[in-house]
Image (cartoon, rainbow, N blue to C red):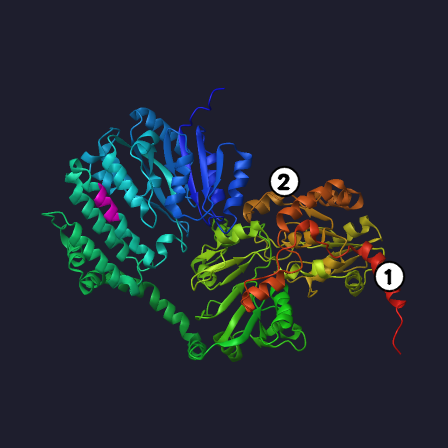
Amino acid sequence: MNATPAPRFSIVIPSYGVQAFIRECLESVLAQDFTDFEVIAVDDCSTDGTGVIIDEFAARDPRVIAVHREENGGLGQTRNTGVDRARGDYLLFLDGDDTYRPGSLRALADRLAETGDPDLLMFDHVRSHWDGRLESSSTPRILGPIGREVVNPAEHPEFFHHFAIVCNRAFRRDFYLKHDFRFTDGYYEDALMVYKVLLCAGTAAYCDHVVLDYRQRRLGNMMQTGDRRQFAIFDQYQLLFDFLDERPEQEALRPLLFQRMISHFLHSLARRARIPLRLRRAYLRRASQQYRKLRPAGFTPPPGVLGLKFRAVGWGSYPLFELLKFANGTREKAQRLVRTGLPRLKRAAGKAVYRAYYALQRLRPLDPDLAVYSAYWGRTPACNPLAVYETARRLAPRQRAVWVVKREHVKSVPKGMAHVVLNSRPYWDLVARATYFVNNVNFLDTVVKRRGQIHLMTHHGTPLKRMGLDQRDYPVAAGTTDFEALMARCDRWTYSLSANPHSSENWARVYPNRWTTARTDGPDTWTSLETGYPRNDVFYRATAAEVLQARAALGIAPGTRAVLYAPTHRDYQRDYEPRLDFERVARELGPDTVLLVRAHYSYDVDLPEGTPVRDVSGHPSVEQLCLAADVLVTDYSSIMFDYANLDRPIVIYADDWDVYSAVRGVTFDLLAEPPGAVATSEDELIAVLGGDAWDDADATALRAAFRRRFCTYDDGFAAERAVRRVLLGQEATPPVVPLEQRTPAPAPRAAGIIAPAVSAEASTVPQNG
């Protein structure tokens, strides 16, 4: 039996905690028009869904090899693991949060064929920033003069000026193995590998194709950790010069490598996110020691300000370095202040009084037992925050909870529920001193997160539509969104709830703040809590009697089929426009069906109401409406994900799917993976509900698959998990009950049988008298 031919490329993808990006990364590779490659995706013991996503791709494409390390080893060891599995002619390294541009592998393969398979092939990249900006690299300027030639890199210093990462070059594997290259532990392992390879390579070429889309994370990049792990750079360069000492034939390159090293130190020092103020003096001391120890004989610093900075490093003079840095940036900062600062001051003047009061209140100590709750931008208490609130009253009775509502919603606050009016003086007292903040949207921009305060973002639905930064590609959805301000609001999150892996993956991608799924918290991180949605607990806890009570409260007669129609809003429609003739639908479905119509909360509606049509838009609890309904009809509302927990029929009415998906943007193809029957016109909807398709075997099978994907963590204990973890600080929380072991609240027909039986049984119990 012949062995499988080696592929042209082995693409090693080290991955840790990149569930937000690994799917896009793998798709960018598998979509290449050049197909002679293997992907070795190595999961370094991720605590999120990274490994699961890798396995998903490996199961559907034989070119993907999934490797799971038994213990976390860091980026270098993870790359080594991938190299050990590689069979290709050339090695490529692609980080799990980066992507390849279309046509890239074809361009590399063609260039390698042209150049006779050199030891090393350099290529171009573009920096992709979180705000959508694309930043071209300096590669064409540096390597462009080499042209189409194959050269010895030791004779061309420009190769050493090429951005020192391993992801922008291809390594011939037999050359790589011959020299026994291995990545070291710790940060800056790229620089050591890059320069060692350049010292050993005999042939190198340049491909001018932009191959790599190099993601610049807003937060969360390991180079922005701002701790002593950044000091690993000194050990890595020491190893490089030790390596150089063993190669006297390359001695002429020592001054160049020394200059690259000091430039690298200066680059890090110039970035406060990398080397914060508390570490700068110590970092400069280490840099100065390295300078004096490794400086080549006769080395002359470069001219100008850069040369002065070199000397400042050599002398270890922190004041001189800061003076040079300040002088270099003063003019730009002054211009920026005039351009942006003064208009901001003018806008803030009218709010100065409350801001000053709020600032004074923040000088007072936090109240460890005070919690702030809010929902839907100050509307009536509802949704996940309300479910957390109710559970906290039972599990954390010492805590005092206060709701924030807008003035126009005060009358809807239940009796006995403490509350303050948004932007009132009591409101500023509350947000200044509370320890816990619970909301299903963001609090106002003016809220400052103090040290010790804990913000729980519960969200208010599983995302079918695009959210967060994804909206940038959909101008109608984005509207006038200030994405910088949005990200600043999300920076306050301490915890983010998730109902399923789909949500976890999307939240991490579209809110690119510093986050983790590990159970370790820091002042600049938010933790994804895969607890399920607290508001959905009732779907597993409600009794048959409570189901019947929910129907009775709506006036639904026994034996009547209740159809809940709950559409979402359209960003491209300012006012509510019914997409159904409600009276016709109700008439066609007959007297045994009642149509419950719930418009989206974004609209103020006044629906015509008749006997078979009930306007429930103003009902305070969508969960009670779901309990009462026999079947849900919706378009693209996230209510479908919640209602699926009840394991009752769902019908998708998608009369404008093409328009909605193009204008609003969606995270998956709902029509290809629906939770039940699909209708694309009013006539089709009437036919589905008037026949058997709404609840036949096909609909049941679709719903089962949908529930497996989206009802992952909702099991009736979500609120308890959230309260114990967030409000009580307990690590041990109730484990998620497997889907097949859960029993949802009974459907109305079953409830009509169960509840009378229970009632009759109870009536036979002797009473004390």
Q: Is residue 429 above or below residue 282?
A: below
Dot 2 or dot 1, earlier in sequence: 2
Residue 576: name its quadrant. bottom right
- The amino acid beneath tag 1 is Pro
- What residue did someone put label 1 on? 756
- Closer mark to the observer between disc 2 and disc 1: 1
Residue range corresponding to the magenta coloring: 237-243
Rendered residue at 17%/52% (across/down): 293
Q: Residues within 10 Å of mark 2 (few under 14, many from 20)?
A: few
Q: Secondary structure at mark 1?
A: helix
Residue 253: name its quadrant. top left
- What residue did someone put label 2 on? 672
Q: Secondary structure at mark 2?
A: loop
In the displayed image of the protein, which residue is found farthest to the top? Answer: 1
Q: Position of residue 79 (x, y in %)?
A: 39, 41
Q: Position of residue 601 (x, y in %)?
A: 63, 61
Q: Is residue 380 magenta?
A: no
Q: Position of residue 355 (x, y in %)?
A: 43, 76
User: Horizontal placement of 271 versus 719: left or right?
Assistant: left
